[in-house]
Image (cartoon, helix red, strand yellow):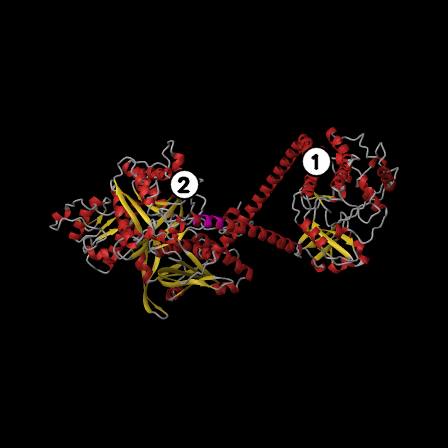
Amino acid sequence: MKFKDNVIAFIGPVCAFALEPVARLAAYWNLPIITGMGDQPPAEGQVSLMPAILGKKNESGNFNDKSEYPTLTRMSYCQCRLTLVFLSIFKNFNWKHVALIIDRSDLFSLTVGKNLENGLRRGSVSTYIRDFDGNDDDPCETYLRDASMYARVIILCVRGTLVRKCMLAAHKIGMTKGEWAFLDVELVQGTHWDERGWSADDEQDKAARKAYEALLRVSLLKPSLSQFRNFSKLIKYKAKENYNYTLSENEEVNIFVAAFYDGVHLLGMAMNETLTNKKNIRDGKAITSLMWNRTFSGIIGRVRIDENGERDADYEILDLDPITGRFEGIARYYGEARNFTPAKDKHIHWPGVSDGPPKDVPLCGFLGNDPACSSEGTYYITLYASIAFLVFTTFVSILAFIINRQLKLAADLNNMSWRVRPEEVLIEVSKPYSSRLALQKPTEIFEPALQEKLNCRRRSDTSNSSLPPAKVYTTVGIYKGSRVALKKVVKKKVDLNKKLLWEIKQVRDVTHENTVRFIGACIHCPTVLIITEYCPKGSLKDVLENEALRLEWNFRMSLIHDIVKGMAFLHSCEVGVHGKLRSSNCLIDGRFVLKLSNFGLRTLTTPSEIIRDSEYYYKLLWVAPELLGEQNTSVIPPTQKGDVYSFAIVLEEIVVRGGPYDFVKNEMTPQEILEKVEKREEPYFRPDISGHDCPEQLSELMQRCWNDTPEERPGFDIMRSIVRQITRGYCENLMDDLVLRMEQYANNLEALVEEKTDQLSQEKRRSEELLFQVLPRPVAQQLMAGEMVKPEQFENVTVYFSDIVGFTALCAQSSPMQVVNLLNDLYSTFDRIIGFYDVYKVETIGDAYMVVSGLPERNGDNHAKEIALMALAILDAVQMFTIQHKPDAQLKVRIGIHTGPVCAGVVGQKMPHYCLFGDTVNTASRMESSGEPLRIHVSWATKNILETFQTFKLELRGDVELKGKGAVVTYWLVGCTEQDPRPPTPINTDTLDPNNPYPLIFPELSK
């Protein structure tokens, strides 16, 4: 940096060898020096020439000693702080025995090691310190063996390639299994540092990766701010533009470059303060003192320079992820706070089975000769005690598990969240295919006189069959805002015993895509309501008997597959069996997925009295022959093989699209059919599907399922694979059809959403434009964002006032509508004109028109120019303006302009208004009122600014008496020497588009 050809500060250098003499020269010349790096100066034993040049004793200095370097500021880090980082790690893991191995052949490793050595000695945590020549052959193994006898934590201050050799040596002698921890220093994360990774593309990579799991790495915290990313992009661009050097895409920008940038920034702040306080700019020590003990936001984040001119850098502790093979941050050390902070949702991958950090001291000592472990008897006592403790712990764990399971089971049984109060349910009362819908009061559902109202969907079979009419009852209700299906059961009493609670727990735990979800039950006797998931498409029986539906075999096979999947799940869960499988209990939801219902809850669903009517016998047509002999009992016991038989009857319904035993429905009653089935005489009486289209494999499966011997019927787990194979030839077409329909629906939906979105965007834009006409755009945007608009003082703006001469007399001669039309035409013309200038219309009150320039966004002195050009354009437009109801009359306006300070802000909440306050507004108003028709009256303040543009023609009017001001000198604005290209021809209101009465706000609506 140069100031009047004299150097006033040094930036750099980086290397300690060069920095040491330059820093001494800077101190000698009293100049500030800032470096972006600056490790320790040359190590002990190396000679520095600079003290001899300056006439001092020939010694190598220490950059921390600011008595020798009083003007030196380091912006990156100080090796002296590394000790604090390591001590924070040791404190966190309670480590007090630490070994330090130093490579003296590498300058960086040596300086870091010596700093750590001094710091660890002061911290009383070092027990073994050795340095060696890293150029020797395999020096690591010997030193590692020696270190293992003194410490379980080993710091490797060695060059990058030697880290891998030491870790491989440690792995070879068994020190990477979790009993020892290793640490090293990699100041900068990235490719520009020396290679310190485990991979070398050789046969030892696998062992090296395993060994590195025992290594923790200390590194400077990598910047993650967006400013640094943008800075990196700029560096790459400048490198290419200025030096023709192209950084590769993956090549990172060195953070020390950013440190130099922050250093220049810090120097600039210090010099600005020096100049502001009128201090000596060449006093390097004074400028340096302003940079020390300071915090600011830099390009790499928060920068803190301590009272000794060193940056409190932040560090990161890295650990190798054994899965990805990459080092990831697991903790951070913040230099300003000086604390160890573990990262959230991160943990250290400690090797071995201990899953924790190594102990500071082994159980039997470092050499295994601790007296507590030396006796063989003590060893066996410890062994037996450990085994006994393990057995006891296992027993207690098993006992706790059993108790916890029993407690959880008891809690599930006693969980009464399934109970529904009567007032929580509303019943939909409607007729089939009726659009009218009513909600029944919750108390009415238990009145016997209103039972018929419960039948929301009733359909009777009007055929001449001897079978009973097929009545389908589906009661639909509203529970917690959702539609549900209600099943009514008449019971005199409901006992909440363990059996009932167990059955409810079982059905509550059933969650499958092909089973209906149980929601709850209302056990308000004598009518019990069971609440389940509502399926809007009805039952399988409804679908099969609806002749209006065309059922292709691909759709039928899909339904069959759903039944098999649902039954296979029920047979494998705690429910174990359905027991009531028939087409009326196979429901179809809105996605045409079949779901099984009415399973389980046998205690709750069994009515108190069984009425053996035609409907009762009709339901027995799905019951297996071996179970029909139990019909004299209160409840027929369900079995899994009985469910298989019921499935075969459902298959017959799907094939013939009719009820069970459809081939004899006109000849036999349900009781007669049941008698023939129950006799079990060969040939067995079974449904006949001959003459119906049915796949041969499905027909064979059906016959196997209704076999008279239950053991020969296949289980649903076997049937699942059989049905899947049969379905394979059909469901491919079904999937194509479904995909095509879904694509069409999605396309229509996308078009509809796009149209609605466009309409919404247009309406939003209109609303915003209307708001922008009422308030200035920046102010309106603040209000829309929910922010408070604070009043603001503007030092210099120009205010315009105008009104119509003789407006009162004109109103007396015109109707109210004519006056409104006149003002609308005139101010529409004005509004169109001011749109071409950097002005803001404040308001219109009657015939008064007020405009201002210079706020809410300042524009220098252009506010006077913008108002003057606008006033000339308005004056030209007024002279050509025609009054519709008085075409021969000449409209005349007075215009006044004044410049000065104002205060502006938003007033009001329901109808917010942007108002101006101050004497400038009053003066501009008086300039207008004291003016003359068709002339522009300009104040002395405005005239002084207009003269600076040298384009406006002004005439002296003379002294004018203004209220509150006395006699002041004013001027007439008569023209401009430069033609203003912005204002177009004034609007002719006769040619306005009748479809768009607001052409200034919505010009796009005009055709």
* 575 relative position to 990: left or right: right
Q: Is residue 92 magenta?
A: no
* Residue 403 seen anywhere in this rendered image of the structure: yes
* 768 relative position to 634: left or right: left
Q: Does residue 651 sit above or below 306 in this rendering? A: above
Rounded to the nearest angstrom, the CA distance separating label 1 from label 2 is 52 Å
* 755 relative position to 688: left or right: left
- Report if the CB atoms under discs 1 and 2 are less than 8 Å apart: no
Residue lying at the far left in this picture: please name it: 55
Residue lying at the far top in this picture: please name it: 696
Foreground residue among 433 and 69: 69
Q: Does residue 372 sit above or below 664 in this rendering? A: below
Going by the numbered disc 2, the residue's amino acid type is Arg
* Residue 974 seen anywhere in this rendered image of the structure: no
Tell me the number on the disc at residue 326: 2
Foreground residue among 682 and 814: 682
Q: Position of residue 642 (x, y in %)?
A: 76, 40
Tell me which secondary structure the magenta stretch mostly adopts: helix
Q: Position of residue 131 (x, y in %)?
A: 26, 43
Q: Is residue 380 magenta?
A: yes
Q: Which residue is denoted by mark 1 in the rendering? A: 555
Q: Which residues are magenta?
A: 378-384
State the SS at label 1.
Answer: helix
Q: Position of residue 607 (x, y in %)?
A: 79, 52
Going by the numbered disc 1, the residue's amino acid type is Phe
In terms of image quadrants, where is residue 963? Answer: bottom left
Foreground residue among 579 and 192: 579
In terms of image quadrants, where is residue 201? Answer: top left
